[in-house]
Image: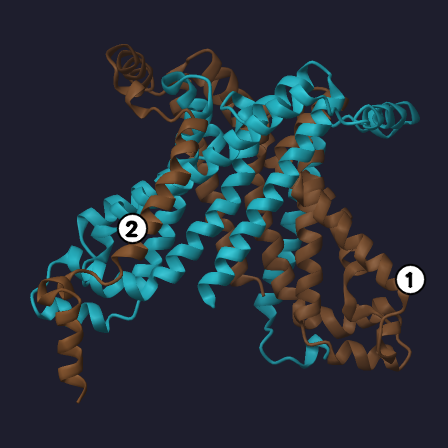
Amino acid sequence: MTLPRAVAGVRAAGGVGAARRDPAWRGRLLWLALAALLLWPALRAAEFTPWTLLDARSLRVSAGYLASFVPPDLRAPFLAEVAQATWRTVAIATSGISLALLLAVPLALLACASLSISRLGGRMAPLPFVLRQAARGTMALLRTVPELVWALLFVRVVGLGPTAGVLAIALTYGGMLGKVYAEILESADGQAARVLLINGATRLQALAYGLLPAARAELGSYTVYRWECAIRSSVVLGFVGAGGLGQRMDESIKALAGGEMATMLMVFVALVAAADRLSAWLRRELP
Amino acid sequence: MTSALQPGRSAPRRAGQAVFIVAALVLVLASFASLDLQWTGLFSSAGLAAMGRFGAEFFPPAREPHFLHALAGAAGETLAMSALGTLLAAAAAALLCVPLARVGGGGAAARVVRWLFNLLRAIPELVWASLLLVSAGLGPMAGTLALALHTSGVLGRLFGEAIENAPPGPALALRLQGVGTVQVLLYATVPQISPQLLSYVLYRWENNIRAATVLGVVGAGGLGQMLAFHLALFQMGRTASVLAAMLVLVLIVDLASYLARRAMTR
């Protein structure tokens, strides 16, 4: 019954040849046209003309630039300088994360709904609700502004040097850590904390004995992971004058010193890989 | 509830945790000691007053029509950089992932590709951008290429993992019929993981719009370049408008990506 009808349908649509055509071609063509229509202005706006990279003059410049990367600069005074800059990068990240903790822990405790006493009786009271939302909003603002922008602003206030980098990491990572800490605490089983609060424990007691035992490992591993990210950030912050390896890289790039760049890129990749390994190992071993 | 009652926590593990805490404290103290941080300039009453003046200079944000026009142009440039960089990276990552799709994990080619992804990923967008400025010149093309290079490392790794974790049945079925690697990838593996691949691309786009707003600080075009320019000239009202445009752009892209993700999962 159905087969003859299908055959008739195919005949009506213009024979077997027409049926072999992709039945979805209209949709595909529409999407392709739409994509092209969206891409064209994007290509124009980004001044994306990769063929200009391939004309003779620009190829000569690029080749000379690349050739200057070998051999890497391995003179002792320069290596000592790089070692010092590398340590400063790690130090900026570590100091920044420590200050971020000072910001994140109070904000997270303020924002965490599992520690609400008024919520025990049903709905949260209005004032605590507003306070929690304010803490959330503060953290959102802190982490939405990129750390590089914080650093640029602080360089204006405190001048070039590591202080701007430390403050930038402290603010951005304070917002990030605080938000995630609050989420981790809220996703942990809240039963124990609730029982403690109902029986008259203070919020800090409920936190220490009700929430932390379950959430401790995750909190620690997230902090270590963020420290690793902060090392990457602190290199980038150096490019706006916040000290460390990034600032030294920026100077070498501006001086077109390819050999120095090669050395520092290798040191940077090794540093990031080492932080990555250390952080993975700590997260596996510690909890 | 008390840790003494937990049988899994042994003495060596506790010793390890103590060592870690001491090492972390030493690192933190050494960090603060070795950096010449200028807290006095910041937290003294004079420093706080200077900070307050600095904050107050941001208001009111600049709203002259010709400036807003330039701002919209820069925002469009940043948006184009992020979208184009992400698309180029997705294409490059997809092409480079082909050797990883071989049944049995692939050989020397797969190792080379993984190594390349690690290298591309290890160098941040901003460093790529300032390296590329010499070849590509000042402007958004250097930024687009920088985003594409870093992102292709990230997406390559994510795509590779998705390919390796895809259920192997359909791929094996085609492979046993003598179908080649590329066809197996296109007709067995990709249809299974395409929602995952698309959500990775969207996630990187959200990241890249953030990166694209700041890339201009080293001269790679877009809002970042405007920010650095007006900040250098102490035009704080205009700086405030640029900052606001950055935040709005990031929010718009997050919303678009959220809607696309929801449309895909429905």
**Quarter-of-image position of residue A228:** top right
| Discs 2 and 1 share one subunit | yes
**Quarter-of-image position of residue B27:** top right
Q: Position of residue B1 (x, y in %)?
A: 72, 79
Query: For the residue carrying disc 1, how many other residues have a C-alpha within 10 Å: few (<14), some (14-19), or many (20+)?
Result: few
Cα distance, mark 2 to mark 1? 56 Å
Residue drawn at (80%, 78%) of the image? A194
Amino acid type, callout 1: Leu
Residue A165 visible in the snapshot: no
Residue drawn at (81%, 82%) of the image? A195
**Tag of residue A29:** 2
Work out whether residue B168 or residue B73 is closer to the camera in this orientation and state it. Answer: B73
A260 relative position to B23: left or right: left
Helix or strand or loop: what does disc 1 sit on? helix
> Which chain shows up in cyan?
B
Q: Colour of chain A?
A: brown
Q: Chain of mark 1?
A: A
Which mark is in front, 2 or 1?
2
**Quarter-of-image position of residue B35:** top right
**Tag of residue A127:** 1
Residue B222 visible in the snapshot: yes
Amino acid type, callout 2: Leu
Work out whether residue B138 or residue A271 is closer to the camera in this orientation and state it. Answer: B138
Q: Position of residue A158 (x, y in %)?
A: 76, 23
Q: Is residue A204 above or below residue B236?
A: below
